[in-house]
Image (spheres, rainbow, N blue to C red):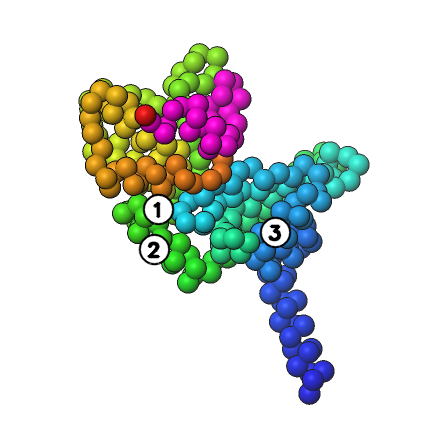
Amino acid sequence: MRNLMKSIFLTFFVISYLTLSSQTPRLVKEALHKKSKVMLDSSIREYKNSEQKYFREVVNNYYEAEYRISENKGEFTWDAAYYINLKIIYIDSLIISYKLIERKNAIVDTLTKENYERTEEFWYSNDSLFADFKHKFLKVFGKELNPEELHNPILFGNQFGNSGAPPDGEVIVKKLVKERNKTALVEMLKSTKFEIQLYGIKGLRQLERTGIKLNEIEKLLISSILAKKGLVYEANGCSPEYTDVLKIIENYKLQGQ
């Protein structure tokens, strides 16, 4: 009976383990199966052309992060290759949801070596913990979390590119400050997207310098945002980059007076 139970357990483990593509790197697959952020970080370092693109806190120690892995398999450019994009939500070391997109090139014509791209997607979510994640966001920011704004950074900053054009968010902030539209700027503080929250603070600090006061609730929202950890997608010349939020706070004077 013990051997039978062991056999049943191993069969279940293998079936659930193989729900990810056979092309998914083994160490990444193991980390996702165990929902371990620590194992995932360790496994990513084992592969060439891999990176953690960003990580940043959304609310109360719940973080979002994105990883990329790419690999040529073989000596020639037409040999099979894969590219993986992995987006996760985690708290502490526990991954509570992920979306894995895998693109694999496959040869169509052995003479021309033309490739086509096959894409597969894999999803996971711990419903109870994701519900807690949403509840925490609503409690802190007073607005429903918008999943569409997760894993979708926008440029934050004053200008970018050779032309020095302002990012879209900066254009909106300038317009709202000119209109002295405090209500709209406060609403930006409640966004799920980190950069939009920071734009809201940026605009409100400018209004403060003109004499407009913030109430205690608005100050508390700002404090909650400035206490978050992680990286911001900053417009930095011609090459945007992810910058530690502490540098963003300092460089753009977001702490205020």
Residue name at image x 51 percent, y 25 percent: 240
Quickly name the residue at label 1: 146
- Residue 22 image position (x, y, % from top left): 67, 55
Real-space Cα separation, disc 3 to disc 2, in angstroms: 25 Å
Give how far apart the Cα atoms at labels 3 and 1 are. Answer: 27 Å
Q: Secondary structure at mark 3?
A: helix
Find out whether the residues at labels 3 and 2 contact each other: C-beta distance under 8 Å.
Answer: no
Q: Earlier in the sequence, mark 3 or mark 1?
A: 3
Dot label at residue 135: 2
Residue segment shown in magenta: 232-256
**Snapshot quadrant of residue 106:** top right
Q: In front here: 18 or 234?
A: 234
- The answer to if 143 sits in the magenta stretch is no
In front of the other: label 3 or label 1? 3
Left or right of 36, for residue 220: left
Query: Could you tell me if the residues under marks 3 and 1 are in contact, i.e. CB atoms within 8 Å?
Result: no
**SS state under label 2:** helix
Q: Residues within 10 Å of mark 1 (few under 14, many from 20)?
A: few
Q: Residue at x 43, y 40 (%)?
A: 228
Label 2 is placed on what type of residue? His
Q: Residues within 10 Å of mark 2 (few under 14, many from 20)?
A: some
Which image quadrant is residue 50 in? top right
- Name the residue at 40% across, 23% down: 252
| Residue of label 3 | 38
Give the CA distance from mark 1 to mark 2: 12 Å
User: Compared with residue 177, is residue 244 higher up or lower down, i.e. above or below?
Assistant: below
Residue projecting furthest to the front: 257
| Residue 103 shows in the view | no
> What residue occupies the far bottom of the structure in this picture?
1
Q: Residue furthest right?
A: 75
Quadrant of image for the N terminus: bottom right
